[in-house]
């Protein structure tokens, strides 16, 4: 339990900080962050505050989808946004392009590590991932179709509102899946059934 709680806390804070690194690189960001940036331009609220508010709205969409949030889902909403705002204070855009590329790459890898940590703690998915799962469980919409449709929609809205869309957005879309696929099995806390099967295989 200590490892699970520690992973959840570290993963959520690191998630916000890594997102701030990618934003400060100014090379484009993921669709949901583009959406938050667009709303930031319109509302004047900080991007971290908007991340929290968007998470709450997405969580409300779980109700008709009959999804149940875990403690990790709620903490995702409460922790990632403030951590993102903190990172925006700590980090500044580098002057050189190669430095910005390195900053973006570091942020992308750390975000995958953060995802592996908090998802691997088995306390529940984030609100956005749970939305995709809910669409699949409730209506049979394949996760890849649901994810693509939702993220394309928020990306378009965010871009129209002035969000940062560039080649980093494409890099994120192409690389985040394989990176998470690598780190999640590596960082996941063994569940009882998994641990039991491992013990049996070692006998």
Image: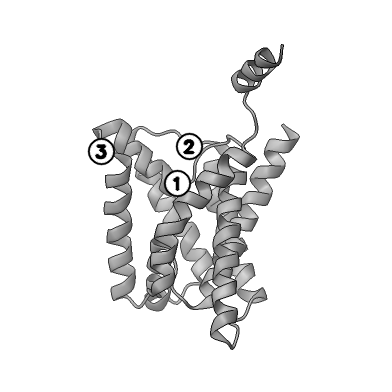
Residue 141 is labelled as 3
Task: Please give the name of the residue rendered at 25% of the width and 38% of the height, measured from the top-left corner.
Answer: 141
Measured Cα–Cα span from mark 3 to mark 1? 17 Å
* Front tag of 2 and 3: 3
- Left or right of 159 in this view: 75: right
Quadrant of the image for the C terminus? top right
- The answer to whether mark 2 and mark 3 are in CB contact below 8 A is no
203 and 48: which one is in front? 203
- Left or right of 48 in this view: 36: left
Task: Please give the name of the residue rendered at 56% of the width and 42% of the height, measured from the top-left corner.
Answer: 184
- Left or right of 29 in this view: 191: right
- Left or right of 23 in this view: 87: right
Residue 196 in percent (x, y) is at: 65, 16
Q: Residues within 10 Å of mark 1 (few under 14, many from 20)?
A: many
Q: Which of pointers 3 and 1 lies earlier in the amino acid sequence?
A: 1
- Residue at numbered disc 1: 127
* Front tag of 3 and 1: 3
20 and 67: which one is in front? 20
Residue 69 is labelled as 2
Q: Which of pointers 2 and 1 lies earlier in the amino acid sequence?
A: 2
- The answer to whether mark 2 and mark 1 are in CB contact below 8 A is yes
Task: Please give the name of the residue rendered at 64% of the width and 41% of the height, measured from the top-left corner.
Answer: 187
Measured Cα–Cα span from mark 2 to mark 3? 20 Å
Q: Residues within 10 Å of mark 3 (few under 14, many from 20)?
A: some
Quadrant of the image for the N terminus? top right
> Callout 3: helix, strand or loop?
loop
Q: Which of pointers 2 and 3 lies earlier in the amino acid sequence?
A: 2
122 shown above or below 46: above
Q: Residue furthest front?
A: 202
> Callout 2: helix, strand or loop?
loop
Q: Residues within 10 Å of mark 2 (few under 14, many from 20)?
A: some
């Amino acid at each position: 339990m200590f490892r699970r709680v520690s992973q959840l806390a570290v993963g959520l804070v690191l998630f916000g900080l890594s997102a701030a690194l990618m934003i400060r690189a100014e090379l484009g960001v993921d669709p949901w962050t583009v959406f938050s940036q667009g709303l930031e331009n319109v509302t004047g609220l900080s991007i971290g505050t908007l991340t929290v508010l968007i998470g709450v709205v997405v969580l409300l969409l779980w109700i008709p989808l009959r999804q149940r949030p875990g403690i990790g889902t709620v903490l995702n909403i409460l922790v990632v946004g403030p951590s993102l705002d903190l990172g925006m204070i700590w980090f500044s855009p580098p002057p050189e392009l190669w430095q910005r590329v390195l900053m973006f790459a570091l942020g992308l890898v750390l975000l995958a590590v953060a995802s592996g940590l908090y998802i691997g703690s088995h306390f529940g998915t984030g609100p956005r991932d749970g939305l995709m799962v809910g669409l699949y469980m409730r209506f049979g919409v394949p996760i890849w179709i649901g994810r693509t449709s939702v993220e394309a929609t928020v990306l378009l809205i965010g871009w129209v509102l002035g969000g940062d869309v560039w080649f980093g957005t494409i890099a994120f879309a192409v690389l985040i899946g394989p990176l998470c696929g690598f780190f999640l099995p590596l960082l996941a806390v063994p569940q009882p059934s998994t641990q039991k099967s491992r013990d049996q295989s070692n006998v």
